Amino acid sequence: MIDKYLFSQAQFIINNFKKYYLNKEGLISRNFPPSSYTIFGHLDDIAPFFIYFKETDFLVQQVKKSREFSFDEILAEKNIIYSYKIDEYLGGLFLIWKKTKNQSVKTLLDEAINKILDYFFKDNNLLGTYNIKKRKSGLHYYYWSSGLLETFLEMGDDYPELIKKTEEVVETWLKDDFYLKHNLFPFRNSSNRTINVLNKIIPKFYFAETFLRHHPGMDDKNFLNKAAGEIKSILYNYFLSGQFTQLMKSNSTMIFTLMEMYKLTKEQKYKLAVINWIETVEKKMYKNGTVYGLYYPNGKIKNKDLINTFIFIDVLMDAYFFIEKNASYLELAKEIIDKRLEKKWDNGLCPVNFDEDKAHIDNQVDFSISIRRYAELSGDEFYLKESYDLMEKTLQLYKGDKGFFTNINSSGKPLDTGKTNAIDPKYNGLLLKGIIHMLTIKKNMYDNPKLHDLFKDR
């Protein structure tokens, strides 16, 4: 009976994609209401879950339709393609091709690989941007782009040349000065030595982070305020040296990549890098059950968002299973989970931050799965129930007529209604992951590689 309910919720989501989330070209829109901006830059956020629910034909139809547009047209934002935003396109295509062996999908997959190698891989490095108008790569590189390296490793059996490319970049990044000094990866660096020297001498990251980031005028409908916001945004990117640490993506994805490198090669340097990184995060970015998302070389830390909690738990649990059976990883994960569960609302949801009256739907899904990881490896059934209950509340409280809302408050009221992505196609697709989590709650994900891969944070 419960499974029937869960399958009906999954079908509700899939039907909404087909009925409400297609744009005028017939492609899944990244936005709702639909726009020309498609979901393809986030294809891996929906593809594995649509495949699980036997919607592979729909995905193949979408890929075939997308052939009307070039690789550049699909992925460029204001003429810029970001290497840290293309792994989900590549990973989604790869998954669909592996499932179907469809030649149209294979053609697009091969084209994507060739473009990526041409645009971003230079001198054993993975650059961050490519300007499609100037036909030129940018100088900066972002450790967030390690998601692409992880995807390359997943594709290695079919494209072994991608493993070599990944090894070359990893070796370059492990020699980075910031990493060698702090044992954490910086937000970004430059392939130009002069720029890097200036970035390290002038502490301009603090000015950028303090005065320029997230200027509210950027979203203001008033023209002058919006223009001021745009100017501040440009200044932010100029003044941001990148010599600080962001836990989510910029570091976590790199650590997952290093774990994959260790599993592939069994080289101790990758194992030690993971172990030392965890110790450093615990020492520098963790206090009393709270994981912080930002670290600055002067020792300052900030950002207590829930997103940092679940991604660090995922690292700890994967490291426990794949790297070393260190009991302190389980103890640390329990402490972090307990702190968040103590602060959950009366309705059972976990807010994005301890003192913010907002709960994001994707946070509930990811944190629920993180709790499950701990429950499985610790053997504590209490946390398995907590994991399931959180997802159960999510399905109940976020549901609307045309999909599940992105954010609600502690009273259960949807936020930002009437605005773009108050119901977000991407997060509705990712909610399917949460439903699969509930359907498979009695299975051990760490004994099932396919299930473990399915629950990776994408």
Image: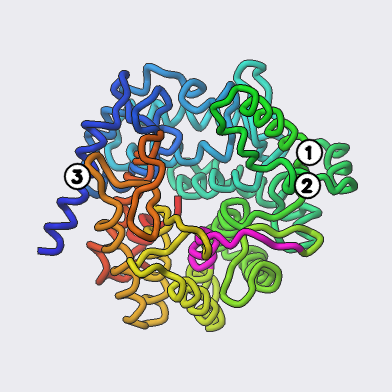
Figure quadrant of residue 51: top left
Cβ atoms at labels 3 and 2 below 8 Å apart? no
Considering only order in the chain, which callout, 1 or 3, is on the residue closer to the N terminus? Answer: 3
Cβ atoms at labels 2 and 1 below 8 Å apart? yes
Q: Secondary structure at mark 1?
A: helix
Q: Is residue 249 left or right of residue 400?
A: right
By secondary structure, the bulk of the magenta-drawn segment is best described as helix
Residue 307 is inside the magenta segment:
yes
Q: Residues within 10 Å of mark 1 (few under 14, many from 20)?
A: some
Considering only order in the chain, which callout, 2 or 3, is on the residue closer to the N terminus? Answer: 3
Using the image, tell me which numbered label, if any, was put on residue 12: 3
Q: Is residue 166 left or right of residue 44?
A: right
The residue that appears at 59% across and 59% down in the rendered structure is 255
Using the image, tell me which numbered label, if any, was put on residue 239: 1
- Dot 3 amino acid type: Phe
- Dot 2 amino acid type: Phe
Give how far across and how far down residue 228 sits, in percent: 68, 28
Considering only order in the chain, which callout, 1 or 2, is on the residue closer to the N terminus? Answer: 2
Closer to the camera, 428 or 436? 428
Q: Secondary structure at mark 3?
A: helix
Question: Colour scheme in the image?
Answer: rainbow
The residue that appears at 30% across and 36% down in the rendered structure is 101
The CA span between labels 2 and 1 is 6 Å
Using the image, tell me which numbered label, if any, was put on residue 54: none
